[in-house]
Amino acid sequence: MVYDHEYRYLERAVALAEEALNAGDGPFGSVLVSA
């Protein structure tokens, strides 16, 4: 289950993956979040 406050982190990971793909790299993005 994904909570509303977690969506910004998911959106950032997707944006990083898209940026990598556009640069010719693998479409992977990750964001580390402290609990």
Image: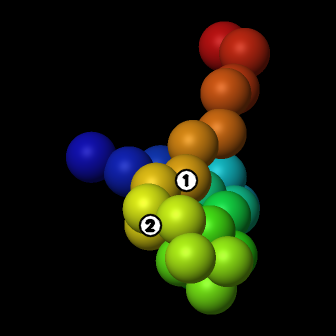
Tell me if residue 4 can be seen.
no
- Percent of width and height locating residue 22: 62, 86
Mark 1 element type: loop
Q: Where is residue 34 drawn, in percent x and y?
A: 72, 15
Which residue is found at the position 62% from the left and 68% from the top?
Answer: 20
Q: Residue furthest front?
A: 24
Q: Are marks 2 and 1 in contact (CB under 8 Å)?
A: yes
Residue 19 appears in view: yes
Q: Position of residue 13 (x, y in %)?
A: 59, 57
Q: Residue at x 44, y 62 (%)?
A: 26
Label 1: which residue? 29
The local secondary structure at tag 2 comes to: loop
* Residue type (three-letter) at the residue carrying disc 2: Pro
Give left or right: position of 13 versus 3: right
Seen from the viewer's position, the closer of residues 32 and 25 is: 25
Residue 24, quarter of picture: bottom right
- Spot occupied by residue 14 in the image (x, y as percentages of width and height): 55, 69
Side of 2 where 25 appears, left or right: right
Q: Nearer the viewer, residue 18 or 4?
A: 18
For the residue carrying disc 2, how many other residues have a C-alpha within 10 Å: few (<14), some (14-19), or many (20+)? some
Residue identifier under label 2: 27
Name the residue nearer the viewer: 3 or 21. 21
Q: Is residue 28 left or right of residue 12?
A: left
Give the vertical position of 11 relative to 22 (above or below).
Answer: above
Crowding at dot 1, Cα within 10 Å, few <14 / some 14-19 / many 20+, comes out as some
Quadrant in which the C terminus is drawn: top right
Residue depicted at 65% across the width and 52% down the height:
9
Nearer to us in this view, 27 or 24: 24
